[in-house]
Image (cartoon, grey):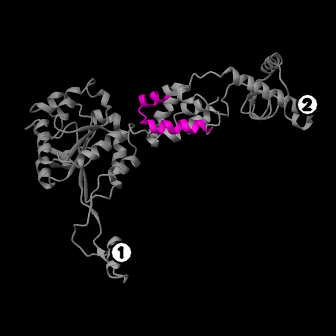
Amino acid sequence: MEFKNGGRAVFNDFFYLLKEEGVPVSPTEWMTLMEGLSQGLAFSSLTGFYYLARACLVKSEAYYDSYDLAFQRYFGEINTPEEFVEQVLKWLESELSALETDPSAREGFRPWNLEELRRLLEDRLSRQDSKHQGGSHWIGTGGHSRLGHSGRNLAGLRISGESVNCTAVKVAGERRYKDFRQDEALDTRQFEVALRKLRQLTTREEGPKDILDLEETIAATCKSGGILKLEWTRPRKNEFKVALLMDSGGSMTPYLHIVKRLFTAVNKSSHFKDLRYYYFHNCIYERIFLNPICVPRDSVPTDELFKKLDSDYRIIIVGDASMSPGELTMKGGAIDWGVSKNEPGLYWLKQLARRFKFSVWLNPKPEREWSSTDGAETISIIRSFFPMYELTVEGLEKAIKKLKVRR
């Protein structure tokens, strides 16, 4: 493929396809790619173009998978131009000439004829009755046989298997970077990294000033005419306090793998002033649980919990918000054992929203299903009290930003 001339016009549709897949491509970056093409940095190959375009157009690895999808859509059906075929034929002609003049170049190379290979294949199939690995005669894998795959015969015919040389479109089609997408479910590491963004470091703590303040030391030394003057400060600590409330059991079972990762991430978290976690089943009622089994003996009254936690706690509620509407809106609608059914779940959610002005709801159910599947009615009601985000990297990023702003 030749990219030096006419690349700008040829690839305009690729630009819009990238934006359609969600890759934030700017005209400036696109012109950088065009400049690279004009200088031959794609080396006239589709693979070269794949890496050059990705380097110029993709700002973050989170968009690598979207880039691969767009690349596969645009170049997946590409046809080999006639000029390329002619170039290959000319190359073969020159190589064959070299074989005629240099006997050592013939080693390992045997010109093949399609009819000859067909007869050879039929003969080997009629006599071979087992798998074959290596060697130079039977149909198999590896070795020097002219029939099979993953071998080293320079003029062989591949039988099944996969080529050891990947084209750019094939590489894009493998979607190696799908785990980097920001709209994919969180793993433990991603959750930890996202939680760290919910920090507000401060030195407004009591205690000795035992940390060297480098900037103030430099300023004080300059003011004293170069005589070293050390300045000390208190350690910076995170003043954010977080309470994580998680739905456990029932309709949350399909999302158990995400919940387990959350448990792990929460247990590893040590960068908040205070971090607590509690559990509920379907909705928060008059008691909230201290472990995911949700049994009354390991629970505390919800109103007492509200009094115990300061109003500046950041509340993160994790649940699919899907239940029978009666559980949310009716007295006696709760299905939890040990609940006296004095107040519906909606009452307690309202109390929670009033008490804690920094609160969000993370829903593991895909956002596209919030208004069309079972639970759509209760999801809609709960969203009217809590900002709700999808439990993905992108959703958590938005939730973290929201938690820094009082509702």
Give the vertical position of 207 relative to 189 (above or below): below
Q: Which image quarter is the N terminus in?
A: top right
Q: Which mark is residue 100?
A: 2
Q: Position of residue 271 (x, y in %)?
A: 31, 58
User: Contact, CB < 8 Å: mark 1 with mark 2?
Assistant: no
Give the vertical position of 115 relative to 315 (above or below): above
Identity of the residue furthest to the bottom in this view: 227
Q: Secondary structure at mark 1?
A: helix
Can the viewer see residue 229?
yes
The three-letter code of the residue at mark 2 reads Glu
Q: Position of residue 57 (x, y in %)?
A: 48, 38
Viewer-proximal residue among 399 and 284: 399
Name the residue beneath numbered marker 1.
Answer: 218
In the visual, does 395 lie left or right of 133? left
Identify the residue at horizontal 20%, vertical 26% (top origin). Answer: 377
Q: Is residue 25 magenta?
A: yes
Dot 2 crowding, Cα within 10 Å, few <14, some 14–19, many 20+: few
Give the vertical position of 228 relative to 239 (above or below): below
Q: Is residue 386 magenta?
A: no
Viewer-proximal residue among 80 and 40: 40
